[in-house]
Image (cartoon, rainbow, N blue to C red):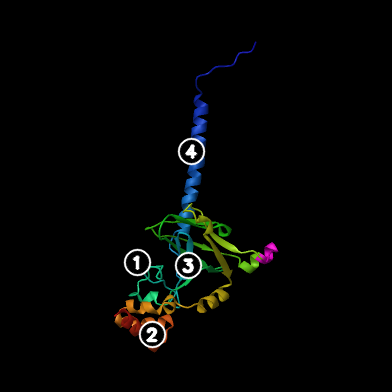
Amino acid sequence: GQKAKFFPDNHYLELAWTIVPAIVLAVLIFTGLRTWNDITAPASKEAEVIEVIGQQFAWTARYPGKDNELGGVNFKLIDATNEFGLKLDDNKSFDDFKSLELHLPANKEILLKIRAKDVLHSVFLPHFRVKMDAVPGMPTHFKFKVTKTTQEMRDELGNQAFNYEMACTEICGRGHFSMRFPVVVHTEEDFERWKLSQESWLKQNPDYLKNVPVGLRESAMIKAGLPVQAGVIAVQATAVGSN
C-alpha cells in the first residue's frame, strides 16, 4: 500500500551535482596548468639538451658534441642518411651525434626536445612519469630529472635484467608496437664518458662535407673529429665521382 513519492525536480540536488564537480575540475585544471608550466618552462643553462625524433616506426636521439649546443635543422634537408635534417652551414651541428638508445645522466636537469617526421607519435617515459606528444611540424619539449641510475634501480628491485624504456603511446600505424626505445641512466661522470666515446654524425658521413660551405669546411672537419687532410680527400673524391 505504499506509494512512491513524486517530485519533478530538486533545485538543491541540481546545484550540488553542478557546483561540486565544477570545483573539483577547476582544482584539477589549475594544478595541472601549474605542473604543465613548470615542465615546459625554459630549462637552466646547465641542463642536458637532447632531441628525440619519431618516425614510422622507430626513435632516434640526437646529442650535442663538446660545444653542448644542438645544431639547427630544416625538414627540407631530411633524407635517408641525414635523418635529422641537419643544417650543415651551422657551426653547431658539426659535432652533433646520433644514438639508437636514449642515454641520460642522473640527478641533472634534462631538456628533451621532440619532433616527428610523419604522423603523430608520443614520447612516454613511464618510470619518470612524463609524457608528451611528438607532433609533425610542431616541435615540443619538456624538462625533467632522473634520480636513480639503471644500476641503482636494478639493485633496488633485485632484478639485474631491469631496463628503463621509452614507448610510443599513439597508435601510429601497423608497426606501432616496435617503437620501444631503450633508456640507459648513468651517473653524470659515466654519462660524460659515454658522450666522449661517440663519433659525430659528420664523421660517420664524410660525404656530406660537400654540403658544408667552403669557408666552414676546415672548422667542420676539426669539430667533427675528421683529419683535415682526409676530409679534403673525401670531398675531392665525392666531387670527382659526381662529375
The amino acid type of the residue labelled 3 equals: Ala
- Which amino acid lies under the numbered mark 4 shown in the image of this protein? Ala
Dot 1 surroundings within 10 Å: few (below 14), some, or many (20 or more)?
few
Task: Determine which of the numbered discs, if any, sits on residue 231 in the image.
Answer: 2
Instruction: Kindly check if marks 2 and 1 are in contact, taking CB atoms under 8 A apart as contact.
Output: no
Q: Is residue 59 above or below residue 203?
A: above
Name the quadrant of the N terminus: top right
Q: Residue furthest right?
A: 158
Q: Are marks 3 and 4 in contact (CB under 8 Å)?
A: no
Say which mark, if any, is on residue 74: 1
Give coordinates of residue 34: x percent, y percent: 47, 53
Residue 43: image quadrant is: bottom left
Q: Nearer the viewer, mark 2 or mark 1?
A: 2
Query: Of marks 2 and 3, which one's residue comes earlier in the chain?
Result: 3
Q: Look at 68% across and 62% down and name the residue there.
A: 157
Q: Nearer the viewer, mark 3 or mark 4?
A: 3
Residue in view at x 35 percent, y 64 percent: 75
- The nearer-to-camera label among 2 and 3 is 2
Give the tally of numbered discs: 4
* Real-space Cα separation, disc 4 to disc 1, in angstroms: 45 Å
Q: Earlier in the sequence, mark 2 or mark 1?
A: 1
Give whichever of discs 3 and 4 has the lower sequence position. Answer: 4
Identify the mark at residue 22; answer none if there is no mark.
4
Three-letter residue code for mark 2: Gly
Task: Mark 2 vs mark 4: give the one in front.
Answer: 2
Q: Position of residue 83 (x, y in %)?
A: 41, 68
Circle 2/circle 3 CB separation < 8 Å: no
SS class, disc 3? strand
Q: Which mark is residue 155?
A: none
Identity, as a three-letter code, of the amino acid under mark 1:
Asn
Distance between the alpha carbons at the discs numbered 2 and 4: 65 Å
Magenta range: 154-160
